[in-house]
Amino acid sequence: MSEQKSTMPDWMQDHIKRYQTDPEKAHLWDSALGGSKGLIPTLLLTTKGRKSGKPHLTPLIYSKQGAGFAVIASKGGAPAHPAWYLNLQTEPEVEIQVGPQHYKARARTAGPEERKRIWGDMVKLYPPYDDYQARAGREIPVVIIEPKH
């Protein structure tokens, strides 16, 4: 087990396992576990550990944005950025799984105007993001993941 998984909450580890064995079912996550309601789309992001060089999997809520996908680096409103975000700042080449589909992709942080527009979309999808932003003490990044074709 990687260091990241040992510190990852059990429900996230379970979601990863479910996604790997039944991606059609795991693609829609029961957001009641995170303080919202309803089923919302998730993807699996694989980043390269900036210290270990090992692959790290993270399940994330996403919204489709053109040909890409937007995710939020909220870490539940913690004051520090999540490890996966720090990893992609070092190495923006990532892999994602969206349902049964796998993509090699490149991740980037959204600029101010793009962030504002996408943040609104993401809050409609998952309202707790506004609470996370209020307590984070940092601007929570919006990340765009663009598949390579």
Image (cartoon, rainbow, N blue to C red):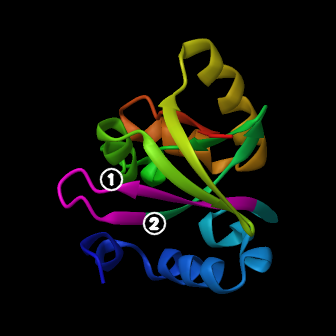
Residue on which disc 1 sits: 83
In the image, is 19 to the left or to the right of 3? right
In the image, is 142 to the left or to the right of 21? left
What's the residue type where badge 2 is placed?
A: Leu
In the image, is 148 to the left or to the right of 140? right
Q: Main secondary structure of the magenta part?
A: strand
Secondary structure beneath label 2: strand
Find the distance from the CA under tag 2 to the CA under tag 1: 11 Å
Residue 34, by quadrant, is bottom right
Q: Nearer the viewer, mark 2 or mark 1?
A: 2
| 61 lies above or below 90 | below
Secondary structure beneath label 1: helix
Residue on which disc 2 sits: 57
Q: Position of residue 67 (x, y in %)?
A: 76, 35
Residue lying at the far front in this picture: please name it. 149
Q: Is residue 105 magenta?
A: no
What's the residue type where badge 1 is placed?
A: Ala
Q: Position of residue 49 (x, y in %)?
A: 28, 56
Picture mark count: 2
Mark 2 neighbour class, 10 Å CA radius: few under 14, some 14 to 19, many 20 or more: many
Magenta-colored span: 41-56
Q: Is residue 45 magenta?
A: yes
| Mark positioned earlier in the residue sequence (2 or 1) | 2
Report the residue at 61% width, 80% height from top.
20
Report the residue at 30% width, 84% height from top.
1
Most foreground residue, 22 or 104: 104
